[in-house]
Image: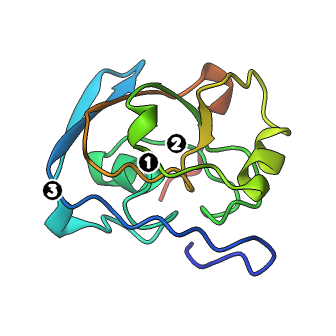
């Protein structure tokens, strides 16, 4: 599912222009981001952590389809948060609904790194959907 949420502020976050790496925890997948391939999928903002996770084959639950209408894609950016787009008030409002929010919490669908540093991103245990229907 892809699209936009007409009820939230538009995020001005251009995707990265240079190569960088994202390490997803706890699975340990390290993904080399190739800016020429962004967007990797049609989920979340182009170049968002959710988009990059899709490109890496790492599952992050996103019940709303990546349009910032839920908090299921809550992640914690342990390293590289300074390189990410600023959270909007709408994103912060959605994060208020998430469990285990920290100062480094973001919605994966809205958080777009600029590629200036590598990232370490944790997918919290309560955000992992262990039961899915087969495709």
Q: CA distance from mark 1 to mark 3?
A: 13 Å
Q: Which mark is residue 34?
A: 3
Q: CA distance from mark 3 to mark 2?
A: 20 Å
Could you tell me if the residues under marks 2 and 1 are in contact, i.e. CB atoms within 8 Å? yes
Residue ID at (64%, 74%): 10
Residue ID at (72%, 71%): 9
Could you tell me if the residues under marks 3 and 2 are in contact, i.e. CB atoms within 8 Å? no
x, y percentage for residue 119? 33, 32
Is 29 drawn above or below residue 55 in the view shown?
above
Q: CA distance from mark 2 to mark 1?
A: 9 Å
Under circle 2, the secondary element is loop
Instruction: Point out the tag, 2 or 1, that comes first from the N-terminus.
Output: 1
Under circle 3, the secondary element is loop
Report if residue 30 is visible in the image: yes
Is 135 drawn above or below residue 86 in the view shown?
below
Determine whether, in the image, residue 106 is placed left or right of residue 98. Answer: left
Instruction: Point out the tag, 1 or 3, that comes first from the N-terminus.
Output: 3
Residue toward you, 97 or 56? 97
Residue toward you, 134 or 94? 94
What residue is disc 2 on?
A: 60
Q: Which mark is residue 65?
A: none
Instruction: Point out the tag, 3 or 2, that comes first from the N-terminus.
Output: 3
> Neighbour class for label 1 at 10 Å: few (<14), some, many (≥20)?
many
Determine whether, in the image, residue 85 is placed left or right of residue 117. Answer: right
In which quadrant is the N terminus drawn? Answer: bottom right
> Neighbour class for label 2 at 10 Å: few (<14), some, many (≥20)?
many
Is 42 drawn above or below residue 15 in the view shown?
below
Residue ID at (28%, 46%): 56
Q: Which mark is residue 49?
A: 1
Residue ID at (26%, 47%): 115
> Neighbour class for label 3 at 10 Å: few (<14), some, many (≥20)?
some
x, y percentage for residue 13? 46, 64
């Amino acid at each position: 599912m892809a699209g936009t949420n007409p009820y939230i502020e538009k995020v001005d976050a251009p995707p990265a222009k240079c190569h960088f790496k994202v390490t997803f925890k706890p699975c340990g997948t390290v993904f080399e981001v190739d800016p020429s391939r962004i967007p990797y999928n049609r989920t979340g903002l182009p170049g968002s952590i959710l988009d990059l996770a899709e490109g890496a084959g790492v599952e992050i639950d996103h019940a709303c389809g990546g349009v910032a209408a839920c908090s299921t894609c809550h992640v914690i950016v342990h390293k590289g948060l300074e390189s990410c787009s600023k959270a909007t008030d709408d994103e912060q409002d959605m994060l208020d609904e998430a469990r285990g929010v920290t100062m480094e919490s973001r919605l994966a669908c809205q958080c777009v790194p600029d590629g200036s540093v590598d990232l370490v991103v944790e997918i919290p245990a309560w955000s992992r959907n262990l039961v899915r229907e087969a495709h």
